[in-house]
Image (tube, rainbow, N blue to C red):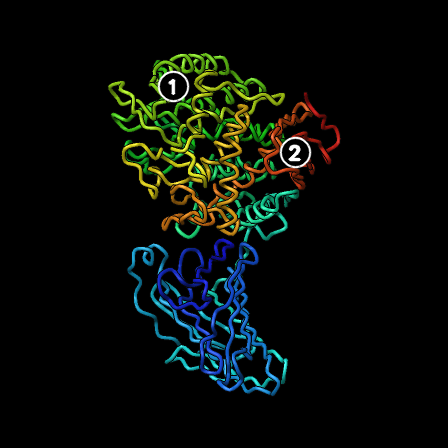
Amino acid sequence: MCIALPGLAISTEQGQLTGRGLEGFYRAGRRVLSRCQVRVAGREPLAVQARMTSADSARFLGTVRTSPHVGPDPDVLVERIRHADGTERITVHSTAVRPLRLPVEVALGTDLADLGTIAAGGPGPELPASVHDSGLRWSSPVGSTSVSADPPPADALASAGLLRWEFVMPPGGSASVELRVRPDRAGPVRAVGRAATSPLAPARAMGDDHRAQHLMRTSTEDLQALLLRDPAHPTDTHLAAGAPWRCGLSPADALAAARMTLPLGTRLAAGTLRTLARTQLQGPGPQSGMIPGPRRDAGTHLPPSCTGTEATLLFPVLLAEARRWGLPEVETEELLPAAERCLTWLRTAVGEAPYLRDPQPGGPERCETQAHAHRAALLGADLLDTCGRPGGAGLRHWAQQLRAAFREDFWIDDLGGGRPAAARAPDGRPVPHLGAAAVHLLDTGLLGGGELASGLLDKMQTEQLARLLGGPAMDSGWGLRGLGAKEAGYNPFGHRGGAVRTQETAVAVAGLAAAGYEKQATSLLQGTLAAAEIFGHRLPEMYAGEQRTDGSAPVPHPAACRPAATAAASGVLLLTTLAGIRPDAPAGTVTLRPVRSAPLGEIILTGLRIAGAPFSVRVGRLGLAMVEEAGDGLQLGV
């Protein structure tokens, strides 16, 4: 899959676009070309290699034997370089010792179907083509598209959708054809991430473990490829949720990914916050202050959750932490009213109760929702105080009440040492299953001076949760299962019922490392890096939670986005966690809390950003961190 939104190109490793399944070139969710099949000397090339060269391009290599009498070696190589922007260069190389006359044919077709229709298995038949300039054109009531070729073909047969060239090639010679597919009245794809104004810094990772370098490079490339602009405010960018299924804005995912990528700069966070502030509900009513979001499957034990609640609670957290990473004060002040409305909604929705319940009638009180709400209250209070706004004391008082109640009501004692409840039913009964949503209890948020906010669990409960997350029921060897393998309803392919979700694994690694449970954090980190290597360092949003064994490999999930914003951002979080970077840009300090066991040996992270200035850090094999580059005036905290 080549991606540079709004452009997308999908094919199998064979390289040929056959029109089956999802194959084709897409622009803004519509398939503008479904079939692009190459034949050389009347034969389809034998595919020998396919690889991604970047997030938006792939290289396919095939061979052709033009004569059965030349022996087993091919005498023609066919190279195809495909880009997400709708261009493809086909190059034919001759390795023959004699001149060759090579006919090259490209069969083209399209149905102009939208992605949703294709995914549901309902695309229509191919449209009839017409000859157009140096290629072919197709039209339907939904629009038109054309393919142009350089050099122009010798023959163009509309009835067969065929372009044909005949090349006379000397020994060792080569010839190329470039195809450009484009909807009518549409210019070239101008991918946000390829612009000089990209909001993400070009970070790099180097060191003893080569996987770190590949993961950082692929993660940042995928993040660049998933960037979108707000059409009404083109200076504001945000991340699409993922390809191919969710190429639009998903508020909770966009905020979570922007938060994990704060080490790459604050501009993505600012653009995401401004974009979502414009969607915030205002006026009278219980939803005033919420950021709308769709419902999301929560597995077999709980009803679907409201991602609008998650997004509303993430908004002030991202703003508070972006300020610590160096978001300019003028931008903080601009976004502060929207954050205040989120916090007002929280206090109104809770009322006199200690817990935040799901917004639908009779909804449960979810464990992760309380974690999100507690973090939002503490970081929101800190934000209000530092900006001279009222309300911080009330938020802290409620957070203190929530902590005291949660440690009693949400903790289930058992012979194994206890566990946090996944939720409380409306009648107060705990929902006892163990799932990865509990990792959010470890994600308390960053305050000033490099300090982390208080968590909902006490020290003994945190230690027990770390033990559970590091146990074989949750740690699959490839990452953290969404539901424990011993729980009723466990399904290794369940979205929230057993599949490994990359984001939650990364949050677990960061939370465990920050709490001092490096053994469990390292096991999950190593498993995720092993999975990433098998996935070509492009982590999917989820994959099957099957147990890792000798010689096994992680199993892809058929419905997973890959790339996905949260998965790509998780790569950044996993690697920066090793250095434990905790900035406080308003105070001019940065604190380092590296993982002392140095699980990847020496690692050097360069090209990061704090307060807009380059920041580089080295963690040695003994687990000691050293700042190698920083902006003027930034001091190392204790």
**Residue closer to the observer: 432 or 470:** 470
Q: Amino acid at mark 2?
A: Ile
**Residue closer to the observer: 187 or 574:** 574
Is 74 situated above or below 205? Answer: below
Q: Which residue occupies 44% across, 62% down? A: 11
Question: Splitting the image into 4 quarters, where does residue 592 fall?
Answer: top right
614 vs 237, left or right, is right
Q: Please state the horizontal and vertical placement of residue 150, each as a whole percent of the image.
A: 55, 75
Where is mark 1, residue-wise? 417
Is 185 situated above or below 497? Answer: below
Q: Please state the horizontal and vertical placement of residue 601, each as a whole percent of the image.
A: 64, 37
Is 619 situated above or below 215? Answer: above
N-terminal-most mark, 2 or 1: 1
303 vs 600, left or right, is left
Helix, strand or loop under label 2 = strand
**Residue closer to the observer: 51 or 292:** 51
Where is mark 2, residue-wise? 610
**Residue closer to the observer: 222 or 414:** 414
Q: Which residue occupies 41% across, 56% down? A: 29
Q: Which residue occupies 54% across, 39% down? A: 271
